[in-house]
Amino acid sequence: MNKRLWLGLLLSLAAFQILGAAIAFVRDDAAGSTAFADLGFPPSFYWIPLLACAAAGCWLLLAGKDDQRAVELGVFFVLLATPFANRWLLVLGQAVPAIWSWPVLVLRNLQADAFFP
């Protein structure tokens, strides 16, 4: 497989994870979830690094589409945002009906950041 196809698949996976985290954040279901119970910060604090990494990655992907180095750095930043989405995906998996919870949890367990190298 060529490099562009792999990057497209990784970016699609990361985009679905970030979108799921955004849905959980907008729904504000974190108060009723145990996903953030063991952490010392409020749940909204964990949205800040996710948003910063995803925004930087998207900016690099869009602005530097002619430069391969900028594209690869943009992919890196988007993949860097996905670990911050994991707890939000757990919140979403607990908040949606059971028929939708297993696809969300499968999406959560696909670790896109494992493809950093």
Image (cartoon, rainbow, N blue to C red):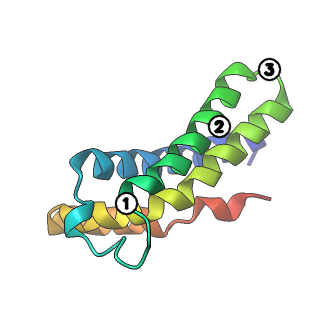
51 w.r.t. 105: above or below: above
Viewer-nearest residue: 58 or 33:
33
Q: Residue furthest bottom?
A: 38
Q: Reading the chain from its start, which is encountered first: label 1 or label 2? A: 1
> Does residue 65 appear in this view?
yes
| Circle nearer the viewer, 2 or 3 | 2
Q: Is residue 92 left or right of residue 71?
A: left
Q: Is residue 75 left or right of residue 11?
A: right
**What amino acid type should be assigned to the residue bearing mark 3?**
Asp
Q: Identify the residue shown where x is 62% and y is 41%.
A: 8
**What amino acid type should be assigned to the residue bearing mark 2?**
Gly
Image coords of residue 23 (percent x, y): 30, 46
**Residue that mark 2 sits on:** 57
Q: Is residue 13 left or right of residue 105?
A: right
Q: Quadrant of residue 90?
A: bottom left
Q: Circle 2: is it few (<14), some (14-19), or many (20+) Cα within 10 Å?
A: many
Image coords of residue 70 (percent x, y): 79, 31
Q: Which mark is residue 43?
A: 1
Q: Reading the chain from its start, which is encountered first: label 3 or label 1? A: 1
Q: Identify the residue shown where x is 38% and y is 52%.
A: 21
Secondary element under disc 1, as helix, strand or loop, is helix
**What amino acid type should be assigned to the residue bearing mark 1?**
Pro
Viewer-nearest residue: 68 or 6:
68
**Residue that mark 3 sits on:** 66
Q: Circle 3: is it few (<14), some (14-19), or many (20+) Cα within 10 Å?
A: few
Q: Identify the residue shown where x is 36% and y is 45%.
A: 22
Q: Reading the chain from its start, which is encountered first: label 2 or label 3? A: 2
Q: Quadrant of residue 5?
A: top right
72 w.r.t. 105: above or below: above
61 w.r.t. 22: above or below: above
